Image (cartoon, grey):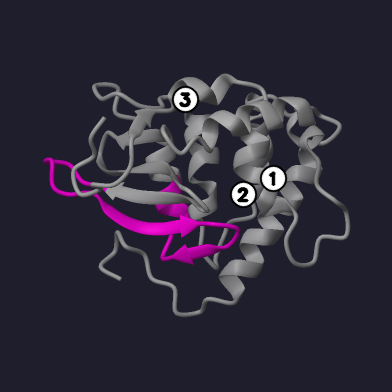
Amino acid sequence: MLIKGYDVGPLVPGESLLVHPGFWSNYLLAMCGDGECAERPVPEWFGEDGADVDALSEVLFDSEHWPVFRMPAEDGPGVVAIYRNLDGDYSTDYLITHPGGSDAERIASWDGGFSGTGLTWHELIRIADNPSLADEGVQDTATRFLLLLPLLTDPDVPETASARVIAALTATGATQDTVSLAAEHLLAHLARRSHHDPTWASPLSGG
């Protein structure tokens, strides 16, 4: 597949992988275990187990097939997440896609740490909750929300954020026993990151 403005790598649609056991641990678990976490994060926080995580990682990090997760939005720019599987240099790239077919713009990357500008809470919710049903990509709003969550760099997250994260994790397979713990650690990571980036500006607001 081709993405205008991103001319590297053997890109393949990745949306079918979202329902495989082990996906969310591969995608989000690292965000639960950095910095000040006193408790070691485990796949069970996401309703998964280590064997499933290991098996799916072979697919997600295949250097010959770079999975792409498309989140087109109905009323404005969307986002694409790409596993950039260069040999020895694995990362997830996040691109803003614009209506009208102009080039996609890379706004952030995750390679064990976050770099880039990210999104406000309002922008994240707008994209998550307004899928473009006419375009190929992820349509489920809970799944879109979790795929976008690593982009959150807003220092002013509402009190309802925790409930939204818990609901999305539950909808994608996390159990009642562990979902609050997973949500707590994800939001704690994002809060620390935002706190240390006071010059943050959104790529969608002219920043």
Label 3 packing within 10 angstroms: few (<14), some (14-19), many (20+) = some
Kind of residue sitting beneath label 3: Asp
39 displayed left or right of 13: right
Residue 76 in sight: yes
Residue labelled with disc 2: 161
Q: CA distance from mark 3 to mark 2?
A: 18 Å
Residue labelled with disc 3: 140
Residue labelled with disc 1: 29
First in sequence: mark 3 vs mark 2 = 3
For the C terminus, which image quadrant?
Answer: bottom left
First in sequence: mark 2 vs mark 1 = 1
x, y (%) of residue 135?
26, 25
* Magenta residue span: 97-124
Residue at image coords 46%, 39%: 63
Q: CA distance from mark 2 to mark 1?
A: 18 Å
In terms of image quadrants, where is residue 56? Answer: top right
